[in-house]
Image: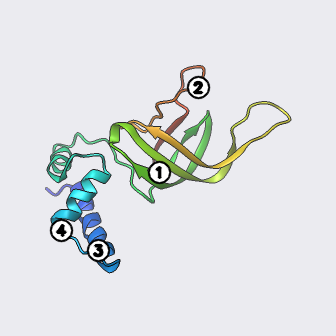
Amino acid sequence: MRNPDLDRMKTQAKALRRALDSAGTPVSHAQALELLAQQHGARDWNTLHARLSCGNAPPELALGDRITGRYLGQPIAGTVVALSGPASHRAIELQLDRPVDVVVFEGFSNWRQRIRATIDGTGRSHRCTSDGVPQLVVQRA
């Protein structure tokens, strides 16, 4: 039985290799796999392959993924526009479909359509609101 996540990673590696080659930076398929593994928070391709083969990998977010979730208690939907770091401590930047007001006081607003945060492997931010709820919670839409 084929592993769809593993197939998706191999397809992404091929696309990365083609993009780098067209930009004048040719890499081997093995190098593309290593780069992709690091992008998804794994030490190397063998580690990512094992994680995906065992089925114990959290659902990884990738650039361009559509997301839904909550930011400061408000529902959000948008697109992942930047990712870096390992899955347990990943920096993420989101472009929201609609801005959210991050201020709860009447008479004052601060609208945001781009959000940056650091999330764990479950899509929850490390930072929490004063009542202990993660500031950001996201999942693939």
- Report crowding for label 2: few under 14, some 14 to 19, many 20 or more residues within 10 A (C-alpha): few
Label 4: state its secondary structure.
helix
What's the mark number on residue 29? Answer: 4
Asked if marks 1 and 4 touch (Cβ < 8 Å), the reply is no
Kindly identify the amino acid type of the residue bearing the numbered disc 1: Ala
**Image x and y of residue 134, in percent:** 52, 29
- Earlier along the polypeptide chain: callout 3 or callout 2? 3
Q: In this rendering, is residue 130 above or below 38? A: above
Q: Earlier in the sequence, mark 3 or mark 1?
A: 3
The image's mark for residue 25 is 3
Amino acid at the residue labelled 2: Thr
| Residue 93, numbered circle | none
Q: Can you identify the residue that label 2 sits on? A: 129
Q: Which residue is mark 1?
A: 141
Badge 1: how crowded within 10 Å, few (<14), some, or many (20+)? few
Please state if 135 lies on the left or on the right of 65 as rendered: right
Q: Quadrant of residue 110?
A: top right
